[in-house]
Image (cartoon, rainbow, N blue to C red):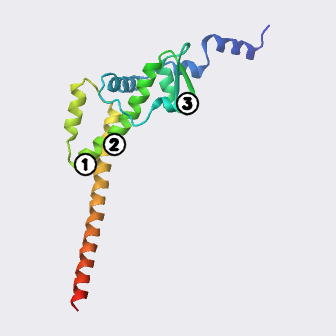
Amino acid sequence: MLSKKERIDQKKLLIGSKRERKRGKHSDRFNIMFKFFFQIVRKDFINFCGSRIDNYYDIQFDTNSIDAKVAFKKYENGEYAPDEVIRTQHPQILYMLIVGKKSWGLWKDEYSLGIAEGTFTKYEILEEFTKNGIVIPESYLIEFTNKIWESRSKLENGNKDLDELNKNFKLRLFNNKLHKQL
């Protein structure tokens, strides 16, 4: 006769722990985010993230391991350390997702800076996503808008500081000319 703990342990081996079963279920929000990161790299729209993923993570194929969605969820939760071997059934998909996530972070900053400087408009950026059939999740649109406002604020503060430096420089030049005349 098995004890209660032994029966629970055997059942965990068969069907997995509660945490592992829950990890296998994906919310609609996660699926939208997953699709977004996958599409931006798959459609070759944004595929430069500024770093080499294979230098940080060793993603390897393993038929008996987890699928790409579960591995990406673990990546999102910070369960993988740099230089750790990540075993998955879909290594290329996981690689694309990580590149997509890092690329979005980089290009969101660059786009917002360009919009704040007036190089292009938010409408032009969003139109390019629409042309490529990529739907940006609402949370990322909010994040993008906030980043634009942050970039505008930094740019204005930088301009104020620059104006103050110019005023001080002109004042020193004027004082030096006045001093030389006396």
Q: CA distance from mark 1 to mark 3?
A: 35 Å
Identify which amino acid the numbered label 3 is placed on: Tyr
Between residues 122 and 30, which one lies in front from this camera angle? 122
Q: How many marks?
A: 3
Reading the image, the residue beneath label 2 is 109
Identity of the residue furthest to the right in this view: 1
Identity of the residue furthest to the bottom in this view: 182
Q: Residue at 24% x, 87% y: name it.
A: 180
Q: Does residue 28 lie above or below 111 as drawn?
A: above
In x, y percent, where is residue 74? 52, 27
Reading the image, the residue beneath label 1 is 116
Secondary structure beneath disc 2? helix
Identify which amino acid the numbered label 1 is placed on: Ala
Secondary structure beneath disc 1? helix
In x, y percent, where is residue 115? 24, 45
Q: Looking at the rendering, in which quadrant would you find the N terminus?
A: top right
Q: CA distance from mark 1 to mark 2?
A: 11 Å
**Numbered tag placed on residue 80 in the rendering:** 3
Between residues 170 and 154, which one lies in front from this camera angle? 170
Q: Does residue 65 lie above or below 82 as drawn?
A: above
Between residues 101 and 23, which one lies in front from this camera angle? 101
Q: Say few, some or many: other residues with alpha carbon within 10 Å of mark 1 (under 14 / 14 to 19 / 20 or more).
A: many
Q: Say few, some or many: other residues with alpha carbon within 10 Å of mark 2 (under 14 / 14 to 19 / 20 or more).
A: some
Residue contact between numbered discs 1 and 2, judged by CB atoms under 8 Å = no
Identify which amino acid the numbered label 2 is placed on: Asp
Pick whichever of labels 3 and 2 is earlier in the sequence: 3
Pick whichever of labels 1 and 2 is earlier in the sequence: 2
Q: Residue at 47% x, 16% y: name it.
A: 90
**Numbered tag placed on residue 156 in the rendering:** none
Q: Quadrant of residue 38?
A: top left
